[in-house]
Amino acid sequence: QVQLVQSGAEVKKPGASVKVSCKASGYTFTGYYMHWVRQAPGQGLEWMGWINPNSGGTNCAHKFQGRVTMTWDMSISTAYMELTRLRSDDTAVYYCARDKGWDYWGQGTLVTVSS
Amino acid sequence: QAVVTQEPSLTVSPGGTVTLTCGSSTGAVTSGHYPYWFQQKPGQAPRTLIYDTSNKHSWTPARFSGSLLGGKAALTLSGAQPEDEAEYYCFIYSYSVASYWVFGGGTKLTVL
């Protein structure tokens, strides 16, 4: 069965970086784009970007350009999202989700940015 | 960048019908925006109900349907159940200088 399993919660200081992983199983990893979405506490969903695991191509929302890097490791069917220069308002749950219907989501990774 | 608007909150009676809408600041929402609808309950990850305007997943209850209505994407719930109380987000594809996706602010649906 299809699963997206994300890495565990992180606590970071302002200015640091965080890298969240999303391990896919149960399907051909290169057959689907992977999107990243975040949700700050009590707030709505925010699209961050996607990666094409087949080509490595990426596209991210304008507000994250220069701070977000999306990568992948085909050998272990894992996508990564790294966010740099963290601020307190980056505190959120970060999700990965499979494209083409967004039928599967990761369980979410809480990233807390606090001094 | 497009701003996607949804009703902040709606209330429906059990067994009743309600329509949630999703508009874009850039103009009419069309099938080319590939509208999605997600349901999220407290403490849970979102769940996709509708994709590409009106397509359902195997887990999407039959009482939910997606459409285009008056220049907006719409999610209609016919025969509301208590378990349908949740936050609903629309999500659309857009393009200006580059392509991007954007969420609406969400609609809190109360079944009462």
Image (cartoon, coloured by chain):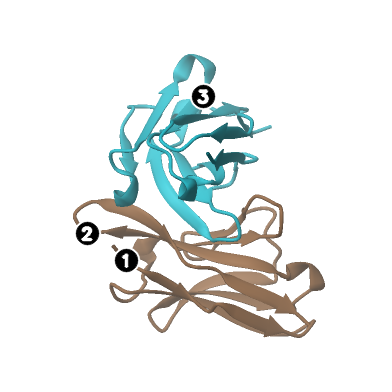
Chain colours: A cyan, B brown
- Residue type at mark 1? Ala
Above or below, A79 against B105 in this view is: above
Q: Which residue is mark 3?
A: A78
Q: Quadrant of the N terminus of chain A?
A: top right
**Mark before the other along the chain sequence, 1 or 2:** 1
Identify the residue at horizontal 42%, vertical 77% (top origin): B72
Identify the residue at horizontal 80%, vertical 82% (top origin): B14
Discs 1 and 2 lie in a common subunit: yes
Q: Which residue is mark 1?
A: B2
Residue B24 screen position, x and y as percent: 36, 72
Task: Say which chain tag 3 marks.
Answer: A
Q: Residues within 10 Å of mark 3 (few under 14, many from 20)?
A: many
Taking the view exactly as shown, the residue that stands out farthest to the front is A115
Above or below, A35 against A20 in this view is: below
Taking the view exactly as shown, the residue that stands out farthest to the top is A75
Q: Regarding mark 2 in the picture, which secondary structure is present there?
A: loop
Residue B35 screen position, x and y as percent: 45, 63
| Contact flag, marks 1 and 2 (Cβ < 8 Å) | yes
**Mark number, residue B38:** none
- Residue type at mark 2? Ser
- Compare residues B90 and A112 and report the one nearer the observer: A112
Q: Which residue is mark 2?
A: B96
Above or below, B16 against A25 in this view is: below
